[in-house]
């Protein structure tokens, strides 16, 4: 996400929040400039040369939901950029959240990753470099 994007983060599935784990930055948060450049120029892999992914402040939230009658865990990783003033979670472990509900926020520049298990009945609906809109774009179906 660029500084011009809305930094509210939405739940990918309806389900229960089963884990929220916060990782403080290892030193100072790094800029995400290389990743932004690679995204604009469509240089793959987009995450190449991006140590911020593991060094910057981040929060990992696990949602336990269902898809087509089978359990589907989904992890959302909120990663703060250099100018971030914090990552917020609006839910607690054990809370139930609806798909598309705002569950957290990153203040100013940031990155959000969605991790779901590979399944034959899931198909990815976006490609590297696509612009997605929170609460509108379907990522996986």
Image (tube, rainbow, N blue to C red):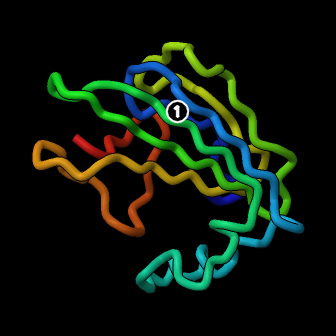
Horizontally, residue 62 falls left or right of residue 120, namely right
Horizontally, residue 113 falls left or right of residue 137, namely right
- Towards the viewer: 91 or 42: 91
- Towards the viewer: 58 or 11: 58
Pick the quarter of the image with the C terminus: top left
Residue at 49%, 39% (x, y): give it. 134
Within 10 Å of the Cα at label 1, are there few (<14), some (14-19), or many (20+) other Cα atoms? some
- Towards the viewer: 59 or 128: 59
The residue carrying mark 1 is 10
Horizontally, residue 75 falls left or right of residue 7, namely left
Horizontally, residue 25 falls left or right of residue 8, namely right
- Is 7 above or below relative to 28? above
- Towards the viewer: 63 or 133: 63
Residue furthest left in the image: 120
Percent x, y of residue 26: 82, 65
Percent x, y of residue 84: 82, 53
Residue at 69%, 37% (x, y): give it. 105
Pick the quarter of the image with the N terminus: bottom right
């Amino acid at each position: 996400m660029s500084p011009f994007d809305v930094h509210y983060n939405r739940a990918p599935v309806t389900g229960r929040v089963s884990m929220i784990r916060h990782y403080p930055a290892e030193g100072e948060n790094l800029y995400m400039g290389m990743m932004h450049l690679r995204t604009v120029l469509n240089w793959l892999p987009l995450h190449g040369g991006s140590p911020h992914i593991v060094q910057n402040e981040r929060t990992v939230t696990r949602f336990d939901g269902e898809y087509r009658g089978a359990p589907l865990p989904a992890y959302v990783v909120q990663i703060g950029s250099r100018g971030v003033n914090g990552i917020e979670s609006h839910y607690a472990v054990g809370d139930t959240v609806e798909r598309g509900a705002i569950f957290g926020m990153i203040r100013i520049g940031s990155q959000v990753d969605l991790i779901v298990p590979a399944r034959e009945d899931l198909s990815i609906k976006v490609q590297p470099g696509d612009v997605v809109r929170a609460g509108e774009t379907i990522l996986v179906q």
